[in-house]
Image (spheres, rainbow, N blue to C red):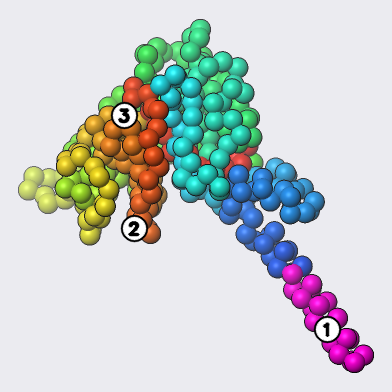
């Protein structure tokens, strides 16, 4: 009997050791791949995890490791910023209305966890913020007049070498491709549909006859090649993806992601995520899983924009 009791205690201790080893493995190798909201829920696991997640070094690692589209920011009919989550349990921000900023704002652009917003008073200053941490920076007053509805693009790529966000704010006039390294640009023609990024390449997407048509930018120099050349600027992704969602019969709207949802069709494409709309009813589609999700009806200001968002801890 004594031997049996000792055997039970032995296995109990062994299981406890395995559990501790697994907890260490998760802490060191898995936590950084989780979105910000899920990480805040991990605060209650233990004091060690809470301390780790709260460090700038962990925030830096998480911003480099987790870059999946988590949802979308948009303006409501009342002009208030709002957030539509692809998974409310996993993705979210503490204050979707962005009231932590010093004035009411309009959302202009988003990139890798950062939002670019524009104030509504004075000279309409630009702000860059992280809606998870509520950190924000006010940008210097621009020299030129950007108009009432500027096509502003926030460019940011997390780097293992930089612990603070090194971002750029670009102003576009027309559809262009801009190389940040060489600082050269090129006009793009025949860009039908909503523009986005997939597998590190520029793409355009639209819905036609219940099929999602995705064209990848394959040759930016096709308009400079010799006559009779068969080189094409855009290459259609095969096979076509059938979308089992009630959408308008043809939605090849020639617009960017900020303005492409007025008549239905593709609103946004980024990575494997596509956002589609039929009026004010929205759906998400995962191209990798070939699965759709009904996001419901939203009170959206059709004159404003919808921008994709990554639930990141990136620090400003």
Q: Does the magenta portion include 13?
A: yes
Kindly report the distance in space between the C-alpha atoms of the residues bearing marks 3 and 2.
25 Å
* 8 or 215, nearer to the observer: 8
Instruction: Give the mark count.
Output: 3
Q: What is the residue that sits farthest to the front in this orientation?
A: 1
Question: How many other residues sit within 10 Å of disc 1, few (<14), some (14-19) or many (≥20)?
Answer: few
Mark 3, residue position: 259
Do the residues under discs 3 and 2 have CB atoms within 8 angstroms?
A: no
Instruction: Reply above or below: 139 against 311.
Output: above
Q: Does the magenta portion include 134?
A: no
Do the residues under discs 2 and 1 have CB atoms within 8 angstroms?
A: no
Residue at the spot 64% in from the left edge and 61% down from the top edge: 29
Q: Position of residue 52 (x, y in %)?
A: 74, 50
| Bounds of the magenta segment | 1-19
Kindly report the distance in space between the C-alpha atoms of the residues bearing marks 2 and 1.
48 Å
Mark 2, residue position: 290
Mark 1, residue position: 8
Residue at the spot 16% in from the left edge and 47% down from the top edge: 209
Figure quadrant of the N terminus: bottom right
């Amino acid at each position: 009997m004594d031997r049996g009791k000792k055997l039970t205690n032995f296995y109990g201790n062994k299981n406890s050791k395995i559990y501790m080893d697994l907890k260490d493995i998760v802490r060191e190798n898995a936590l950084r791949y989780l979105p910000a909201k899920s990480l805040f829920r991990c605060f209650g696991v233990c004091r060690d995890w809470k301390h780790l997640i709260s460090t700038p070094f962990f925030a830096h690692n998480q911003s480099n490791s987790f870059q999946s589209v988590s949802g979308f920011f948009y303006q409501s009919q009342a002009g208030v910023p709002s957030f539509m989550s692809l998974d409310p349990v996993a993705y979210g921000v503490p204050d979707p209305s962005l009231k932590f900023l010093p004035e009411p704002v309009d959302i202009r652009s988003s990139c890798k966890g950062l939002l670019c917003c524009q104030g509504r008073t004075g000279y309409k200053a630009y702000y860059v913020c992280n809606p998870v941490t509520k950190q924000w920076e006010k940008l210097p007053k621009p020299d030129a007049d950007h108009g009432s509805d500027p096509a502003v693009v926030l460019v940011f790529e997390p780097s293992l070498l930089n612990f603070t966000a090194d971002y750029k704010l670009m102003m576009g006039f027309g559809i262009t491709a801009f190389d940040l390294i060489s600082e050269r640009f090129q006009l793009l023609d025949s860009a039908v549909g909503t523009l986005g990024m997939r597998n590190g390449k520029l793409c355009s997407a639209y819905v036609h006859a219940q099929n999602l048509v995705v064209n990848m930018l394959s040759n930016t120099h096709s308009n400079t090649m010799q006559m009779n050349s068969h080189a094409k600027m855009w290459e259609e992704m095969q096979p076509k993806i059938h979308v089992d969602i009630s959408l308008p019969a043809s939605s090849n709207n020639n617009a960017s992601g900020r303005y492409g949802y007025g008549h239905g069709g593709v609103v946004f494409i980024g990575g494997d995520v596509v956002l589609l709309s039929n009026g004010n009813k929205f759906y998400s589609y995962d191209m990798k899983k070939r699965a759709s999700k009904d996001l419901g009806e939203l009170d959206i200001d059709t004159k404003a924009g919808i921008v994709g968002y990554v639930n990141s801890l990136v620090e400003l």
